[in-house]
Image: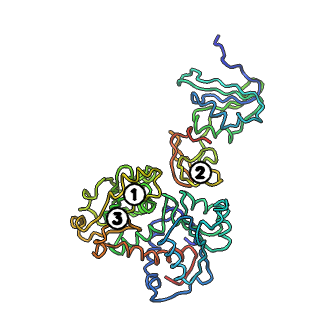
Amino acid sequence: MTGRHLCHISDLTVADMDRTLDAAEHMVPIAQGQSTTDAAHGKILATLFFEPSTRTRLSFESAMHRLGGNVISVADSSSSSSQKGETLADTVRMVASYSDAIVIRHPREGAARLASRVSRVPIINGGDGAGQHPSQTLTDLFTIRKAKGNIKDNVVTIAGDLKYGRTVHSLALALAAYGTQMIFVAPESLQVPAETRASLLAHGARARYANKLEEVIAETDVLYMTRIQKERFPDLDEYRKVQGVFHVTNRLLADGKKGIIVMHPLPRVGEIDQSVDDTPAAKYFEQAANGVPVRMALLAETLGVRGVA
Amino acid sequence: MKELKVQPIRNGTVIDHITGGKAVTVMRILGLLRPGWTSTVTAAMNVPSSNGRKDILKIEDRELDAGEVNKIALIAPNATINIIREYEVARKEHVQIPEKVSGLVKCPNPNCVTNHEPIKTQFLVVSKDPVRLQCGYCDREVHEVADHIV
């Protein structure tokens, strides 16, 4: 993977993903500050975020610092050149000349691919509109593997905003590659888009579609909740119709399979009741924490940093 | 004797078997509607044929090359190209749908980066019959290609 772009989850094979997850295991003590490394000394990561981000940006920056490298970033996209009318391609070319890799987040689908076509350094997609979020998927896979022992032998129910949720689009394709069984639960208007469904079909994915969590909770090993993304709705009336449609409670989970876990890429806005937080099922904060070792492993692979894992 | 609806041309290109009603779009794709175009162009539309209705374009004194003509395959997959020299057909070819399409089609996804940045669109041809394209940036599929020609 050294020197390769990661724009779409399909840029990775199952072997690539497994190798990254294995490496991430070794990164955990460093990510937690129990040991240190300067393996990436002299390397510079640029974070180019044109959309707000807390977890992705901070975990990438933390990961690079934990590896002993440096980070440069634009403090706020409103102060960047794009506001002066510079094209994305020109911005990326310029930032590429200042760094060894770029993490980009952008509100438009395909922005990371555009960046990859003009950049002389590897591009990592930190989320492009409603498109893809492959580094989040690696974090999700790591969390599932850690909690359940493996990725394949689970029924993963993915619920919420499956239309605009980029984490869902990446995760579904990755799970399909592993042969994991999936159930997609959403109101009809927020179900998985046609292109992703077609890709799932082409991959021979074991997928089914439902409208209510109650119908599928008994067979679910991993419940992956997502936020209904108000900011991506072209029509706010449409948002209001589906707002708050899912709310996971301990009562719902009591009907679930033994050992069920609940995940969420965060932030959550009412999808999971706070009373779930203190139960063994709640894995979403651990999932967020896993973002650092996983992104350390991804950065180490991408930058060709050796001697850490 | 069967009356010819369109007079033969001496030299140039005849595009036959264009899907009925698509001649104007074909002209647009080939740049025949641009102000600088000076060759004589004759169009016959909705001409009865064995497969229903077809359009025919006759372009005088200009031999179109395969690269130019294959662009029209997206909307007229059955078209044939006849190069005419001294009233005779010097060469006849069927259009071929290319593997990739660049700059000719607009992505139907309003949030695709290609609709917001000054870049040429790129599509992969994922099906030739019926023609379906996939955006090389956002993966959105295009089913009704004629509706999205730039």
Number of numbered callouts drawn:
3
Q: Which residue is mark 3?
A: A270
| 3D distance between C-alphas at marks 3 and 2 | 34 Å
- Residue that badge 1 annotates: A161
- Of residue B131 and residue A250, the one placed in the foreground of this image is A250
- Residue A249: in sight, yes or no? yes
Q: Secondary structure at mark 3?
A: loop
The residue carrying mark 2 is B115
| Chain ID, mark 3 | A
Q: Is residue A269 left or right of residue B6?
A: left
Q: Is residue B109 above or below residue A273?
A: above
Kind of residue sitting beneath label 2: Asn
- On the image, the x and y values in percent for residue A140 come to 41, 69
Do dots 1 and 3 share one subunit? yes
Residue B73, image x, y percentages: 60, 38
Chain letter for the residue marked with disc 1 in the picture: A
Residue at 61 percent across and 50 percent down: it is B121
> Do circles 2 and 1 both sit on a common chain?
no
**Which mark identifies residue A82?**
none
In the depicted structure, whether residue A247 falls above or below residue A275: above
Residue kind at label 3, given as amino acid type: Gly
| Pick the front one: B66 or B137 | B137
| Disc 3 and disc 2 on one polypeptide chain | no
The kind of residue on which mark 1 rests is Asp
Q: Is residue A282 above or below residue B100?
A: below
Discs 3/2, front: 3
Query: How many neighbours does mark 1 have within 10 angstroms: few (below 14), some (14-19), or many (20 or more)?
Result: many
Residue A117 located left or right of residue A214: right
Give the CA distance from mark 1 to mark 3.
Answer: 13 Å
